[in-house]
Amino acid sequence: MNTHGWTLCALLALVPLANAGAAEQAAQDPPDDKAAGDTTQQIDACKQQQRAAGEKTELKTAIKCAAKVVFQSRIRHKKDEDAVEMTVGSPPMVTDDSDTPGDNNWEVNLGMHAEFAGGDHRIEAPTIDINYGIGDTIQLTYEVPYAFVRTEDDNGQRVSANGFGDSILGLKYRFYDNKDAGLSFAFYPQAEFRTPGSSKIVSEVNTGVILPLVMTKEYEHASIGAEAGVELSGGEQRWFASFGAGKRLTDRTAILAEIAGTDINSPQSKHILLNVGLRHKISETQSISGGLGRDVYAGSAEREQTYVTLNYQKLFGK
């Protein structure tokens, strides 16, 4: 028997194995019309196509078709994966999004956020951000960082401290969701308070309430997002607003960009920053992201800051 004959025998010997593998995969996967029919029928259909295309050698036709069925069976049955999330969201962005984890699902973020201005810095590592979905439109949130701070005290002396930063409890409610238009809105009230036992140097605010309204608009290959609201703390009102856009570079990587303003009602403490980031999908339940930002404007009592954010996200319950 020549080489072609042995090759044909080897490929045809694999046909029953491919048929058994296809049957096992079909039991696990949803029915697929493109994968309908058993392996023998697929080979026969392939042979007819080869003959119609002008192939006259039966041996070559049999080899091509046997190889095609054997080596493409798993590709045909492979489940489609969702592409990377391209909406602008925190982390690594300042702008939040209207998405929630889904009923009984968990979203856990472990991150690092750093702010640098002159000789001062604030580094939060790790930041623990835990989100739980109730139904399809509600999310409960708890967030707390461990912070390392170097700053000036009231006497102008450099001081350093570390410890748990302020905690945040939040409830996001997506009250409008038009899937056909890709447009959704959410209300995301949060309470911020000093974590018990934390240092006054590490703590950033007195007990306060954050009241943002979030908008997300998704297109086929891009998305935009906006957020606006007010922070109420110590009898003061601090308004904030941001706008961002995201686009997929590949099925696993998306680029994000935003402009965000904090304390925009105060000429002394206002900050306006530009931020860019990347999000990369590792698997269906894991992703990493990073952002780099810089103030383009700082109020008269402030200095321009540089911002760095890194984050790992894990989903549970999917």
Image: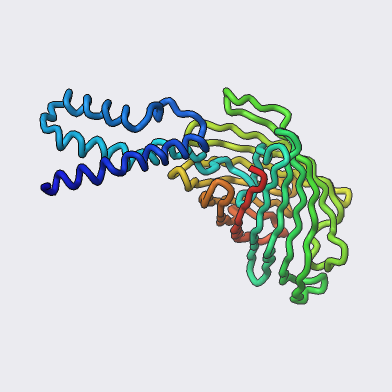
Viewer-nearest residue: 285 or 195: 285
Viewer-nearest residue: 92 or 35: 35
Type of colouring: rainbow
Q: State the image coordinates of residue 237 (x, y, percent, origin top left).
A: 81, 45
Number of labelled discs?
Answer: 0
Compared across the picture, whether 218 is left or right of 34 comes to right
Q: Residue 9's quadrant in the figure?
A: top left
Q: Give the residue at x 61% y 40%.
A: 243
Quarter the C terminus occupies: top right
Q: Is residue 211 visible?
A: no
Rendered position, 135 above or below 283: above
Return the residue found at the far front.
1
Rendered position, 159 above or below 27: below
Viewer-nearest residue: 59 or 215: 59
Q: Give the residue at x 74% y 65%.
A: 146
Q: Give the residue at x 38% y 27%.
A: 37
Compared across the picture, whether 34 is left or right of 161 comes to left
Q: Is residue 157 visible?
A: yes
Q: State the image coordinates of residue 217 (x, y, percent, origin top left).
A: 59, 32
Q: State the image coordinates of residue 52 (x, y, percent, origin top left).
A: 17, 23
Q: Give the residue at x 59% y 60%.
A: 308
Q: Residue 159's quadrant in the figure?
A: bottom right
Q: State the image coordinates of residue 262 (x, y, percent, origin top left).
A: 70, 49
